Amino acid sequence: MSAGGVGGRPEPEQSLTMRDVAERLGVSPMTVSRALRGQGGIGDETRRRVLAEVEALGYRPNRLARGLRSGGPTELVGLVVTNLANPFYSQLAVGVEEICVRSGARVMLGSTGEDPAAEREVVADLVERGVDGLVVVPSGHDHAHLAPDRLRGTPVVLAAGPPVGVDVDCVLVDDFGGSRDACRRLLARGHRRIGFLGLPPSLWTGSERFRGYALALEEAGIPVAERYVSRHRGDTALAEEAALGMLALPDPPTALLAANNRNTVGALRALRRRSPGEPPVALAGFDDIELADLLNVPLTVVSYDPAELGRAAATLLFERRDAPAALQPRRVTVPTTLVDHPTPR
């Protein structure tokens, strides 16, 4: 059923649907969907007509009808993460959901597989489904699709990475400080050859955690040796392979610093494969890992609360929703601490 309004136009927000937009233009709802998502399969002129009509009508999903259909809260928050296999994101989601529940909202989760193209599709789909806000863990450096005009006014907060080219709120971990502190701890214990199992430099976490490692070495008068550095996607198998390669060198590192929990697991697997008579290798890693206190290897971790990251992001999101024009883009940094897990007796 088409919505009625003044002059035959549908009333804004309360009753306008994608089908109404399609009927006014004489096209299918799928055509409207493709135009809004930037997909192919339609002509440029049709796309321009659809976008112009959407802008003129102020099309937004019907929140009240959505709540009546679901029998629950009338607001939805989209959470977009990069890797569901990483426990970090489950804890982040717990924090986001905690604040959303308090605010009478539900969370819709989307995963991008660390693919920027997939991220654009997931974000467009969530906006099309009518989410009232987005928390996004960015997977690339092109954030143009997260600009307010591209999201039709949907507020967005970035988590674990800063915005590039768009003015939006973000919540970060102290990646630089945590990595520097961990490397300093290893240096204070007498290590001078410290291997780094890092993340790609294209990632914010990858560049900042490497920067902390490099600065700690520089402060100690030790140059960064490329043979002790590996920078790849956080993958346990790749980290294990990289660690084994470093430990097979004629002058192997006496300590390893892993840039995230999955790299730490890879390093632990590499150390487990060493012969009993080989010299011990110290290990430090960013992100705490479950059962770290039960390992047979002494481990220092850069610890913080991923759930707090989620809570902070959701809090910024609801504040932005309530006062969109009154607030300048904000940046919140979640602190880190070093935790030593000695070998159990």
Image (cartoon, rainbow, N blue to C red):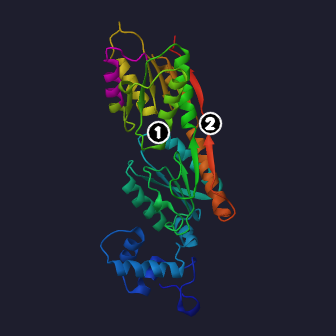
Q: Which residue is mark 1?
A: 207
Where disc 1 sits, the SS reads: helix
Residue 111, compared with residue 322, is above or below; it is above
Q: Is residue 294 above or below residue 179?
A: above
Q: Residue at coordinates 34% horizontally, 77% vertically from top-left?
A: 44
**Residue range of the region highlighted in magenta in the rendering:** 239-254
Please provide percent x and percent y for residue 330: 63, 52
For marks 2 and 1, give the CA distance: 18 Å
From the top left corner, tell me how far across and down residue 93 is, in percent: 53, 47
Mark 1 residue type: Ser
Question: In the depicted view, which residue is nearer to us: 115 or 81?
Answer: 115
Report the number of discs.
Answer: 2
In-image side of 113 versus 100 (left or right): left
Where is residue 12, by image quadrant? bottom right
Instruction: Classify mark 2: helix, strand or loop.
Output: loop
The one nearer the camera, 1 or 235, is: 235
Which callout, 2 or 1, points to the residue nearer the camera? 1
Q: Is residue 34 above or below residue 139?
A: below
Q: Residue furthest top?
A: 277
Q: Which residue is mark 2?
A: 335
Q: Earlier in the sequence, mark 2 or mark 1?
A: 1
Quick one: label 1, few (<14), some, or many (20+) residues within 10 Å? some
- Above or below, 10 relative to 209: below
> Is any part of residue 119 visible from this angle?
yes
Q: Position of residue 75 (x, y in %)?
A: 58, 63
Q: Is residue 122 magenta?
A: no
Determine which quarter of the picture holds residue 15.
bottom right
Q: Amino acid at mark 2?
A: Pro
